[in-house]
Amino acid sequence: MFNRTIARKYTLRREIGRGGMGVIWEAFDQALRRPVALKVMTPEHVTSDSARRRFEREATAIARLRNEHIVQIHDYGIDEDCPYIVMELLEGEDLEHRLARERQLSPSATLALLRQIAAGLQAASSAGIVHRDLKPANVFMARKEPGECVKLLDFGVVWTLFEGSDEAQQSSFGKAIGTPAYMSPEQVRAVAPDHLSDLWSLGVIAYRALTGRPPFVARGVGELLISICTDPFPPPSSLVPALPPGFDGFFARALAKDPAQRFQSAREFVAAFAAVVEVSSGPTKILVVEDEPDVALMMRLQFRQKIRDGVYEFIFADNGEAALHELRRHPDIDVILTDIKMPVMDGLTFLGRVPEVNPFAKTVMMSAYGDMANIRCAMNQGAFDFLLKPIHCADLEATIDKTIKHVAELRRNARSDEENKILRQFTSAALVERIREMGPAIALASEAVMATVAFIDIFQFTRVTKERPPGEAMRLLRANFEVIVPELMAKGGVVDKFLGDAVMAVFQGPEHLSRALSACVIVRAQMAAVARRAGESSPYAQGICVGLSTGQVLSGSIGSQAYGRLDYTVLGEAVNAAAHLARAAVPGEILVDAPVREAAQALFDFEEVGARSLLPGAPPVDVFNVVRRGPAALLADCEPTVRIPTTATMP
């Protein structure tokens, strides 16, 4: 294709790379007399309608993003039935080549890199765009004046959140899209992606940059997928002892299996990383934002002894914009003293920007007595306190001391929250919610409620426990539950308990039956998809057997209160029925009884399985397998209203 002219204006000069669906060429734009990068779809993809739609979606999605850290699109078109994308031509190298050459980067170099990647991700996230294939090969360090500029490349598998999903996007459901080593657990399970998946990939990139290896390493793809969903990763300090100790906690959050436990934005991710890089046991940092130079002199004189003793360190800025820059440079700032009326960016605007850079820092507003309207506005926006000008030294010292103590308490509470998260992993979620809503004493009370109960059993997993070492067998069982539990919770189910190799989930509240059925159908599909990807030797290949029943259950605490050994659970016919149905099911079946089929037959498709004996010696009863969600359920976004029977009829 050398010297071929595309669209009568782009002359191909040399091949410079290959992406997921296309070949990238250096080309010359004859109209504007400039070099460009031109991506041409490969012949094997040209005949695919879905590939062509993805290619076009890549062009239109990136073209909307006017951000210096995302490669810019100049043109898109079709030449001789072959789609092409014209982009800015970059000179430099991608991060994959740099890491292969240098192996590791310093924390400060990694921070500089992450700041720019995060800026691109934040722009994409704000536009409702998920990259889905963030990896070092798609992070390009372009040579610019005066230094390097990081650019995100290859949005070929981009996902758009805010627009109506087209057929090409819908067809990707159930498919793991991305590069395995950088895929999040939810990508492994092939659920609809969001920006938190990109932040997971960013965490993997940061981990590899600091340690020289990815956090999850395995012999094959199937084993790697299990490890991503199930295994802990080596703390960075175990690989590079010289790293600041705070990185272990940082990556515990950045690579949390549960998306809700991760950093929730690229800004928060980078701010936390910067805090680890720059935080020390040094002085308390106080940022003073004031355009009057006399204030800086007054602060230095008033606190000269504490500055000399290393108790306080003052940082000064003359407007809100400069102050934001200092906040990013010093993420361990605890106290901010800011004027309201300043040039460039006023104090009220700055106040609203502080939490996105540093969620712990507290702001004290400084203003004249006659400016009470602005002071009230500042307090309503979250200012911690205010000082009236002219500032009295005693009042200033007391306010700073009070603010420092408050921030220290916030940081202690944050650490306690992390500890509580660990404890909650070993406590009934239903009990935690009940105590939080109603208090410890009321949580011990019992009540009768309408609910749907689902038992999801890993088929013949007992055989695995006999064939594998204990630690490996438990790891493989957890690998299954890591796929099952998120979908149960996503539909409002509460994991009541794990009974050996089965999980019992309870759905209460509006439309509990339809939500439970939808969750089980999705879990079955995801388990089958993961089993296909991981291979026949993976733990997912065992298959799942599901039983589901609905009706009135008794909810409450059981056990010995006198000896402090209690559990919170549900009891009743529906519980027994679901357990028996799961026991009677074969892999891939979601068995229900006649009342469930009757209540949900307008929204789900069922097939009659026939009569099965649910208990030894008991007469067989007719049971039904849930085949799929019907058109009405899909139209109702899988949360339809169904008529719930008042009792469950199961021997």
Image (spheres, rainbow, N blue to C red):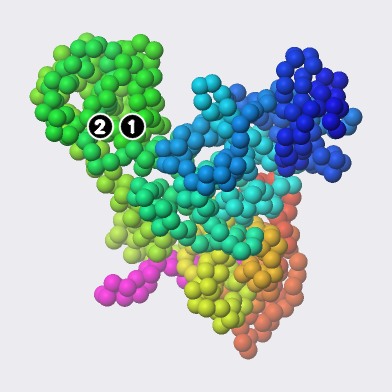
Looking at the image, is 173 positioned above or below residue 111?
Answer: below
Which residue is depicted at the point 40% across and 67% down?
568
The percent position of residue 2, horizontal first and vertical second, equals: 84, 31
**Label 2 amino acid?**
Lys
Outermost right residue: 80
Q: CA distance from mark 1 to mark 2?
A: 8 Å
**Label 2 belongs to which residue?**
285
Which residue is depicted at the point 59% across and 29% down?
142
Outermost front residue: 101
**Label 1 belongs to which residue?**
330
The percent position of residue 1, horizontal first and vertical second, equals: 85, 33
Label 1 element class: loop
Looking at the image, is 44 positioned above or below residue 382?
Answer: below
Disc 2 packing (10 Å; few <14; some 14–19; many ≥20)? many
The percent position of residue 575, horizontal first and vertical second, equals: 53, 71
Whether residue 571 is visible to the viewer of this picture, yes or no, is yes
In this view, the residue in front, 198 or 135, is: 135
Q: Does the magenta-highlighted stretch encompass residue 553? A: yes
Query: Could you tell whether 346 is left or right of 544 in the image?
Result: left
**Label 1 amino acid?**
His
- Magenta stretch? 547-574
In this view, the residue in front, 50 or 152, is: 152
In this view, the residue in front, 133 or 445, is: 133
Looking at the image, is 289 positioned above or below residue 499?
Answer: above
